[in-house]
Amino acid sequence: NAGVTQTPKFQVLKTGQSMTLQCAQDMNHNSMYWYRQDPGMGLRLIYYSASEGTTDKGEVPNGYNVSRLNKREFSLRLESAAPSQTSVYFCASTPSGIHTDTQYFGPGTRLTVL
Amino acid sequence: SQKIEQNSEALNIQEGKTATLTCNYTNYSPAYLQWYRQDPGRGPVFLLLIRENEKEKRKERLKVTFDTTLKQSLFHITASQPADSATYLCALDTMDSNYQLIWGAGTKLIIKP
């Protein structure tokens, strides 16, 4: 059981480049999330997917798009990267998406945009 | 504005003592509060969840309290060990923010031998 996996672990982009962050979970969870973590700030939700086939915006969705490819996989795409998107990105999943669920996180992707 | 606050300064504690971390919030009507541990270069790991009608929750050396009057949660680690050194995050679920937890920035705990 790998839990939540993310690729790549590190990435450097130039302004304007695009890339997709991949996330997969093997726990048969229904809900998946993308967060960004910046120094001195709490985790901020970018997008989430309550169940396969649905996605919704979180607190900071601008500049990002997501795809819930199937129950296991949830990808985050930066179409035109900006320096403000330099951050650590975490994918998480929860069994049902109910409020008492605990979140299971991946190891993160450290993204630098020059 | 709504916000959740944790001490931004690192907390240094002598091994064997009790470490107490604070999570304060404003303008929320919380239903649940969760505590997570985050080690450098890793994702957060869940520790404890406490409901608004629970005053205290324990798990081994960990204890969480939740005071909705003071709008505060305290997280205690008794008999602290160097291996407890990490950043601890609190996250609030208000039931108003569908599927969304509101996260504090975390407090870095350093346990000195």
Image (spheres, rainbow, N blue to C red):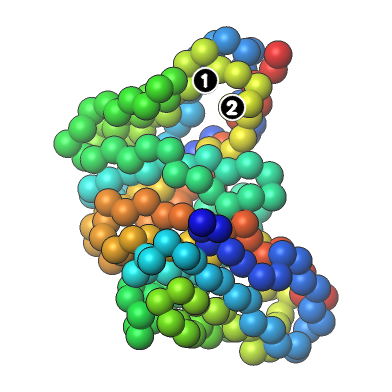
Where is residue A16? Give x, y as percent: 75, 89
**Amino acid under label 1?**
Ala
Query: What residue is pinned by disc 2?
Result: B84
Where is residue A2? Give x, y as percent: 55, 58
Alpha-carbon distance for marks 2 and 1?
Answer: 10 Å
- Disc sitting over residue B19 in the figure: 1
For the point 37% across and 51% down, which residue is it? A102
View extreme (top): residue: B16
Q: Earlier in the sequence, mark 2 or mark 1?
A: 1
Horizontally, residue A81 falls left or right of residue A57, namely right
Q: Is residue A56 visible?
A: no
Q: Quadrant of residue A14?
A: bottom right
Secondary structure, mark 1, is strand
In the image, A22 versus B111, the foreground residue is A22
- The answer to whether marks 2 and 1 mark residues whose Cβ atoms lie closer than 8 Å is yes
Secondary structure, mark 2, is helix
Subunit under mark 2: B
Circle 2 or circle 1, nearest the eye: 2
Where is residue B17? Give x, y as percent: 55, 11
Q: Is residue A107 above or below residue A75?
A: above
Subunit under mark 1: B
For the point 53% across and 85% down, which residue is it? A65
Quarter containing the C terminus of chain B:
top right
- Characterize the local packing of mark 1: few (<14), some (14-19) or many (20 or more) Cα atoms within 10 angstroms: many
Where is residue A108? Give x, y as percent: 63, 60
Q: Is residue A21 visible?
A: yes
Q: Quadrant of residue B90?
A: top left
Q: Is residue A97 above or below residue B52?
A: below
